[in-house]
Amino acid sequence: MVAFDLRKQGRSYREIQKEIGISRSTLCDWFKKEEWSKHIRSSNQNKNKLKSKDRIIKLNESRAVMLSKKYKEVESEAEKEFLVFKTDPLFMAGLMIYAGEGDKKSKNISRVSNSDFYIHNIFIKFSEKYLYISRENIKMALILYPDLNALECLQKWSEKTKVPVLNFHKTQIINGKEKAKKLQYGVGISIISSTVVVKKKILKWLDLVCLENS
């Protein structure tokens, strides 16, 4: 029988169905009790796993090449922009804030932590003008001591930074070592999330500032 001959050659049910038109459910009924067919099925599954693994490796390699190309384009654009922006006080102020208060370790998130409203306002204006991030897309989070009123602090930060209350993440409460309250409204964190391009630009600009002043 043709179906049995093809199966013994190591063909899958899908391949046999395609060649002679017999459904996979029928083929399964024919071969499910055949030990030799079970070995072929196991062998085919292992082959498919290897093929799938190879496809994933190739896909990841392709993505890595594309990302590398994209990052080079971003850095090249950042170099050109730096030549235009570097004489603007707001640009340098935003970079210096990030140099001192910004997160440089995470890959996708650009964030600044500080207890002063004006520091965040400068960074947000910097983000709007040079990174083209609207204030409505800026997220914020607060770190507060237990003796602070969370709602009052949230409203104050929203009022001072003009960032909508809905853009604030869940407030984090921490226990400080000092008994006396030192930060009236806690620590604010301005966040630009899931933007590798933004992070690349900021870090590239900081590198260029260092090169110019070395």
Image (spheres, helix red, strand yellow):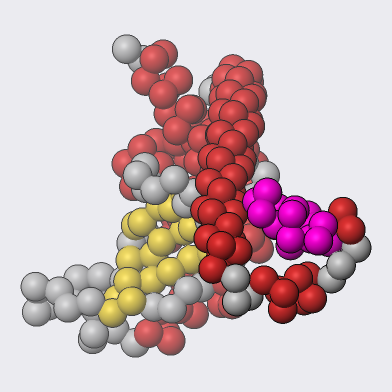
- Seen at 25% across and 70% down, the residue is 183
| Residue 106 locus on image (x, y percent) | 39, 48
Q: Main secondary structure of the magenta part?
A: helix
Query: In the rendered image, which quarter is residue 41 located in?
Result: bottom right
Residue 195 seen:
no
Looking at this view, is 26 or 139 the one in front?
Answer: 26
Rendered position, 131 above or below 14: above
| Residue 131 shown left or right of residue 149 in the figure | right
In the picture, which quadrant includes the C terminus?
top left
- Asked whether residue 4 is drawn in magenta, I would say yes
Looking at this view, is 2 or 12 the one in front?
Answer: 2
- Seen at 70% across and 57% down, the residue is 7
| Residue 126 shown left or right of residue 213 in the figure | right
**Which region is colored magenta?**
1-17
| Residue 49 locus on image (x, y percent) | 54, 52
In the picture, which quadrant includes the N terminus?
bottom right
- Which residue is most to the right? 21
Rendered position, 194 above or below 187: above
- Which residue is most to the front? 1
